[in-house]
Amino acid sequence: MLDANIRSILMQVRDEAADQGIHATLLLHHEKSHLMRIGNSSVSLNTSEDLLRLDMVVTDGRRQGSQTFLGAIADADVVRSVLAAAKEKARVASPKTYDPIPDEVDVPVSEDSQFDTDLAELDPEVKESAYREIFGKLGEEYNYSGSWSSGATEVYLLTTANRNEAYHRGTDQLFSLVLKHPASKWELTHQQTGWRAADFAAEKTTDEIGRLLPTFENSGGCKVDPGEYTVILGAGAISEIVGMAAWTGLNGRGWEEKQSWTARMKPGDMILGENISLVDDPGNPHTFMFGFDMCGRKRGIFPLIGDGELLNLMYDSGTAARYGRKPTGHDTGSPSLVMDTGFGPSDPLDAARDMGRVLYIPALHYMNLPSRSKGIFTGSSRFNAVLVEDGRIVSPIFSTRITDSFQNVLGNVSVISSIPESVNGSNTYGRRTPVAMSVPSYMIASGIKITDSADSF
C-alpha cells in the first residue's frame, strides 16, 4: 500500500497550494521492477529497480509548467521545491492558444484488484529455473533467447481542484522465449502474460512450441509468392493491427488534424466489417485494468466501433481543449482496448478445414505505416508462421510481409474466434506502465495482400 507518510506529505502540500490559489496536479509513480534477459541459452541480464517519481504540473491561465522529481520523499520541503520549480516554469512559459481544461479527480478511487504479492516479490531464481526447465524439455541443441519482466506499480493522483484522491496498485508480467535452430535459422516463439505469479506455467510454452517443432524440423519451409491470400491471424497479429488502427484512426487529435485514415468519416459511418466491434473497457480482466486517467477522470466502458460503425473518438485533455471537445478519459498510457469475440471454434485449424490453402500468421513484427492517412500498414510474420491446407499444417513459411489497409483486412473477416486472449503490449523501457488488449485468439480474413517473402528463414 501507499506509504502513509508520503501520502500525508503530498496531501499537505496539495492543500497549501490550493490555499494559495495555485492550480496544480501531483502524480506519484512508484514501481518495483525486475527484468531477466536470456541470450545464447543463458542469463545475460538480471536487474531490479525500485523507483519513486513525482510529476507536478502547474497551470497559470494559459501557461503551464511541469517538473519531475526522482528519489526519496522524506519531507514536505522536497515536494514544495518541486511545486516551486513547476510554478516558475509556468510563469515563464509561452501561453497556449487555448484554455487548458483543469485537472480534477472526479471521484475518490482506490483500486488494487489486480495486485498479487507473489508476483510483486517473485524471486529471480524462479525465472531462471523455469527457463532451464524449458530448455531441457525442448532440447539443449537449440539456441534460446528471451526476456521476463515483472513488477508492481503504484500510482497516486491529487489535484488542487478538490480533496479527492485516486490510487491504483497492480502487478504485471511479460514472459517471452525464442527458440532458434542453430543451422536452419528458423525461430519459434511463445509469450505469457498476466497479473498473478500463477498465470505463468513452463508447460504452456513447452506444449505450444513442442507442437510446432516436428513441422519445422521435418520441412525445409516454403516461400509465399506475392498475391492475395486467406490468412489466419493469431491474437498477436490481431492486437498489432487493431491497436495501430485505433491509434491512427480513433484518436481525436489525428482526426481533427486530418491525418488519420478516418479523417473523411464521421461517427455513424461504416468504417470496418459488420462483425468488428471495439471498446475501451478498463474493467475487462484480460487487460491491466486502470480506473482513472492521469487528469483524474473516471474511466468506464467507452465504445469505439460497433458492428463496423464508427461510434466515438478518444480525446485527451489537451486535444479536447484545443478543439472544443469533451475529454474522454484518455490521458493514459494504459488503454484497455477490447475487441469482441465471434462464434468460431476454439481451434483455428478446425475453422479453416474447408478453406483449402491458407496462411497462418500468429503475430506480426516490424510494424510500420507506409500511409497513415490511407490506413496502410506493413508487418512481417517472422515467427511460427505456417502453411495450412484443408485444416492441416503442412509446412513452415519463410518470413512473409503483409502490406494492406486496416479497412481491407478488418473489412473481410469471415471467422472470429469465440475465445478471448490477453495480449501484453507493455514497453520494458521507461517507467512501468502495464498495458494489454483483449482480442479473439484468432480471426480469418480473405484477400489479404502479401507483398514480399524472404528466400529462407
Image: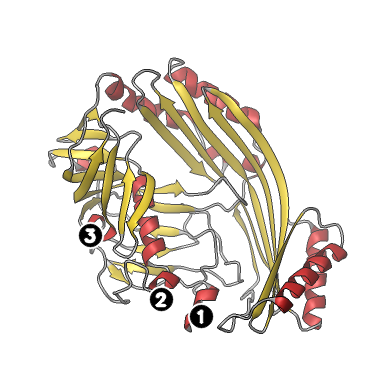
Of the image marks 1 and 2, the number of the one nearer the N terminus: 2
Q: Determine if residue 441 is in view.
A: no
174 vs 285: above or below: above
Q: Quadrant of the C terminus?
A: top left
376 vs 382: above or below: below
Q: Which mark is nearer the camera, 1 or 3?
A: 1
Q: Which mark is nearer the camera, 3 or 2?
A: 2
Tell me, yes or no, whether the two marked residues, 1 and 2, touch with CB atoms within 8 Å.
Answer: yes
Q: CA distance from mark 3 to mark 2?
A: 24 Å
36 vs 433: above or below: above
Can you give x and y, in whole percent of width and height, for residue 432 in the image?
A: 61, 50
Of the image marks 3 and 2, the number of the one nearer the N terminus: 2
Could you tell me which secondary element the residue under label 2 belongs to? Answer: helix
Q: Which residue is mark 3?
A: 411
Q: Which residue is mark 1?
A: 322
- Circle number at residue 256: 2
Amino acid type of the residue tagged 1 in the rendering: Arg
- Residue at 49% x, 28% y: name it: 145
Amino acid type of the residue tagged 2 in the rendering: Glu
